[in-house]
Amino acid sequence: MVKINGKTKLAGLLGYPIEHTKSPLMHNSAYDLLGLDYAYVPLGVSPDGLADAIAGVKAFGFVGVNVTIPHKETVIPLLDDLSKEAALIGAVNTIRNEEGRLVGYNTDGAGFVSDIEEKFSFSLKGKSMLVLGAGGAARAISVSSLLKGISSLMIVDVDQDKAGALIKYLKKHFMAQLSYTSPESKQMYAYIQKDLDVLVNATPVGMHPHEEDIPILNLEAIAKNVKIYDVIYNPLKTKLVKTMETKGNPCSGGLGMLAGQGAVAFELFTGVPIETSKMLSFIA
Ligand code: NAP
């Protein structure tokens, strides 16, 4: 148990609503394990209180805070600086207090990268990836994977304008082979069958209570060596993951991405590294 005293350093999570978060459990368990004098608190802040809350982070001398829905984008103008990754993603999920200057980071994509590389013992560098979805999760995963050196990326979304806009944006910043298409298209299946390394579901398809839904129909088209990563963690194993596991593919649900973003944020706040698998053990 964390024992708060006069010297305890504070971190927390700004979001709304916040009741169901796993972050305090994850961070406080890690402080406990490593004997660090920190405490991590939930900070329920509605949109009209965000500016005051950010001023409070400075005034109370928090070492940093995580940021979740609905503040990830609206918090940006309230900060003093942004990391390269957060600027590219256009969203912040971690703020570090750097001697009174609040700097925004995005550890969601880095959490995905550290989890998938640690779990499957491989490097994303030079790999090809297909991402289903073009929303916030897909954007963070795409940017961080491109920064890690993937050589090609296809984005698949029902909303073609959204997928096209994301690819157009990424083309301005990265040299990799970048394309987009619609779900179930010929182009999508051609890409899957041409030496695909990683398939990511970054849509909410398959999430509770729609656990029977699956975001891609012809699973037979996916070769056995393709790694499957579903960002959903409720349920822990989606129908996509369960089915592909049975076929023998290396598969992962999204809880490790949550743990991974927590591990990167933990190090930003404390300066102490921690393995993603350790963070995962606190919330699994
Ligand atoms: P989002 O902004 O709503 O984006 C999802 C995108 O997927 C939307 O553009 C949606 O299009 C599209 N889509 C829906 N069905 C599709 C299909 N069958 N094929 C292709 N595209 C489809 O959501 P998000 O914030 O990115 O979150 C996506 C998922 O990631 C959620 O389940 C969330 O819980 C999870 N997540 C997990 C973590 C983690 O740490 N593991 C972190 C962040 C998010 P429409 O808008 O037209 O429906």
Image (tube, grey):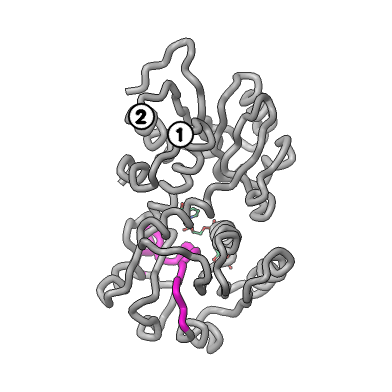
**SS class, disc 2:** helix
Label 2 packing within 10 angstroms: few (<14), some (14-19), many (20+): few
Q: Amino acid at mark 2?
A: Leu
Question: Which range of residues does the magenta coloring cover?
Answer: 195-212
Which residue: 53% across, 89% down? 186
Q: Position of residue 195 (x, y in %)?
A: 46, 82
* Left-right relation of 152 to 193: right
Which residue: 48% across, 85% down? 194
Numbered mark located on residue 34 in the image = 2
Q: Amino acid at mark 1?
A: Val
The magenta stretch spans residue 197: yes
The quarter of the picture where residue 210 lies is bottom left
- From this viewpoint, which residue is outermost toward the top? 6
Q: Quadrant of the N terminus?
A: top left
The magenta stretch spans residue 162: no
Q: Position of residue 138 (x, y in %)?
A: 55, 62
Numbered mark located on residue 272 in the image = 1
Q: Position of residue 73 (x, y in %)?
A: 66, 47
Please determine whether, in this image, residue 174 is positioned above or below residue 38: below
Q: Position of residue 20 (x, y in %)?
A: 42, 40
Q: Are marks 2 and 1 in contact (CB under 8 Å)?
A: yes
Pick the front one: 242 or 278: 278
What is the magenta segment's predominant secondary structure? loop
Pick the front one: 158 or 73: 73
